Image: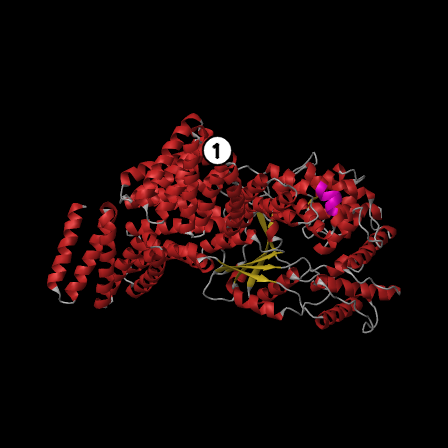
Amino acid sequence: MANTGVIYGSVAVGTTPYRMESFPLETPQVPESGGPSWLLAARYEVVPFTSRSGELDTLGAWRDQPQRSRMVQLIYGSGGQGKTRLAAAFARASAKLGWQVIAVCHNGATGPLAPPIEPTPADRERMQGRLLIVDYAERWPTRDLISALTDQVSCPPASAVRVLLLSRSADYWWQGLRHELNKSGVQADEMALGPLSDDRAGREAEFARAAHAFADLLGVGDTDHLCPPQMEGDEWRLVLTIHMAALAAVDACQRNEIPPANQAGLSAYLLDRETAYWSGLYSDRRVCTLPVVLGRAVYISILTRALPFARAVNVLDHLGIDAASQVVDDHRICYPPTDPATALEPLYPDLLAEDFLALTTPGHQVAAHSADPWAARIPAQLVGSREPSDQGPDYRPSAVAILVETARRWPHVAQTQLNPLLLKHPELAIAAGSSTLIRIAETLHVDMTVLEAIEALLPPGRHVGLDVAAAALATRLTKHRIAAIDDDGERARLHARLGWRLANAGLQQEAAASYARAIATYKRLADTDAAVFATNFASVLVNFSHVLSDLGQRQRALDAASEAVGIIQRLTASNPAAFDTDIAASTLYALGDRLGENGRQEEGLGYAAEAARFYRHLAASNPIKFESKLAAALTGLASTLAILGRCEDARAAGAEAVEVYRRLAASNPAEFTPDLAGAVTSLSATLSASELYEEALPAAREAVEIYRYLAASNPARFEPKLASALNNLGAALSDLFRTDEALAATAEALELRRRLAASNPAAFDPELALALNNLSVDFSNLGRREEALAATAEAVAIYRRIANANPSAFDADLARALANMSADLLHARRTTAALDAAAEAVEIYRRLSGSNPHAFSAGLARALANLAASFSELGRKGEARAAAAEAVDLRRRL
């Protein structure tokens, strides 16, 4: 089992963020004196698990796929939907078939190294594979979860490994994790766990089944007369709510009372019975702690989760609980820990625990359950500081996540606890991680002042780990701020800032819409007061052009960049004193890039070179502010020079950009690692174009490694760039005749690009065609001619379609693909079709080389060679000699 390794700036040695335990397959007997929470807890299964046969069948089919050795499945749904019970049922079924079932638990950053659980030799004889189950997966730090899963699926003790993740959500954290697993060859799928039934009849049937089970256990007579509540509304979609209603009905029947009819009332009723359970233990002298104090220990345990015994005592002592050691001992009697070395086992199920927090906290309006004034100070005291003797992992991020989940359903918890806590300590929200930050931004009862305090702590620039959360915060705050102001200039600035945050998060469509709103306002303002607003207008147009480029809208992107340059030129012509070198350089850089994307590299070169010259001058006097911009301009300039065949100049510019970004990323990896990856990708392509294949390969590998890391945190933003880096790596390997490795890299790039192109063909069809073209070369090198022809034919079809719409941008790509296809057709003995493809490639290359022979003569020579071979196969010897002679002449000159 591998330890955590270097992750771009941080190193962990000799520790692991997780531990593995044997999954409990036996259902324990419910203690006779247990409270209602025990009767509802998934591990006791008082209500037998007989539903979800469809989901179990689906999971069984997933587990038993013979062609895949490593697979991951996420099951997600609201708290109380039945994820844990489903996982336990699946675990038991799998164990009976010979699967070793392991629970993977988060250990915290300083946890001890966890040894692998090895099967006995006898077990290994019949073992089908290993099934790993991870609960609360969304609460794990992404890197810790990736570490756990990649360790386990890459070094399995069995031929097959299946990982089952349980989570309340499947938002961005899952997208990043799924990507990280897929690129490692691990298939990752997801299953949304819906309600058992969406109709009243189905809910009533489940109520009756649960009531019968509870009545049997509690010794209550006939339950047929029990009347279920109306069970209308979203809260009744949860299996747990139905079971809570059934338990309350049975208990009320015993007591000749009327059970409550809504979830809040049910929680209050059952928690009242939980308090009675503690009182009974105290009355029987089985515990020495007063029930009110036990309740406080329960409250604390929900926030801290289980802790080592000594630390649990320290926490209670820190919070002013008298006789803390005795209270911890008594709490262990009330709630025996699953791990004997720990204490403060939290109340389960989670939904009931969150309701206990809410109903114990003053401020609610549920008359059936009295709050404890003591609780008003505890979250701030527990989470707002660490106990002096703290040893081990920090429980505060998890506690904040639990408070957030509680506040989503209980407004008074947000108003009296979460808001004051985060207003005073907004750093706790940042420490809780992006997933919790997003939940905070989406929680309606969180005050705007709190969101503003959190936003103020976010890095002012990009941050690969927080960009998605920053975009979520900015989205809600921008809407609030714009509604409160009348200043059009400020509105435009807010829309532009939101566009920037959204673009960093990879939400390009949303970013484009926000930029468009800013542009519309700035355009109107600049018409009346150009001196004040023109530069802002131009800056937003530059950012807009970058986003449009990412979306594949190349002509619109070029128009935006051209308009930005025009604005600056007009402004400085009328007022030379208004010239801003930074703004001018950014507009020139954008226009150079956009011209290059549209196949107009000769035009773009002048703008790219001028932008680099401006930024070099600025960086000389202020390197902290402008070195990164110089590196960006140099990267763009290098790409343009390489396409134009000026490889020596391109290598020099690209190498300088990499050197600058490497230095910046060393001191600020969260902001500049993406730029370093882009510069290294560009340099690897330039080195390949210069035929320096041995030098290109390590650069290509480094780019892939960095983008894998980045895409794990933000797939929307970095998966497209990873695909490009993989494509470069495949080409570099192919150039060195390491064809099997090249095929693997190119195939992975193709898989990513197919998925991306399916959702946005305008942006990703060109990249898909490039991957197909490279794949055809790999297949040809391996002698797999039919597969090569299929790939290149698909590439030609895509390039033909997009070149018809934008010939200047894609004619060269079409010509290259046609030349490849003509060679594949010749091998397939389809000579006439090969001749047609070669002739079309020659025609396009002739036109292109007429204006830029340095860039396109090599392509023309290759196409002519294919044309000569096709003529020769058809017996047209004179035409074959003429084409071959022209090809030889071109190559001699090259």
Circle 1: residue type: Ser
Of residue 101 and residue 521, the one placed in the foreground of this image is 521
Asked if residue 420 lies left or right of residue 99, the reply is: right
Q: Residue 693 location, x and y as percent?
A: 29, 45
Q: Residue 791 location, x and y as percent?
A: 33, 62
Q: Which residues are magenta?
A: 413-419
Q: Can residue 273 be seen?
A: yes
Label 1 Cα neighbours within 10 Å, binned few <14 / some 14-19 / many ≥20: few
Q: Is residue 628 magenta?
A: no
Quarter of the figure with residue 751: bottom left
Q: Which residue is mark 1?
A: 667
Q: Residue 780 location, x and y as percent?
A: 28, 60
Q: Give the prevailing secondary structure in the magenta stretch.
A: helix
Q: Residue 450 location, x and y as percent?
A: 67, 41
Of residue 653 and residue 163, the one placed in the foreground of this image is 653
Residue at (72, 66) in percent of width and height = 47
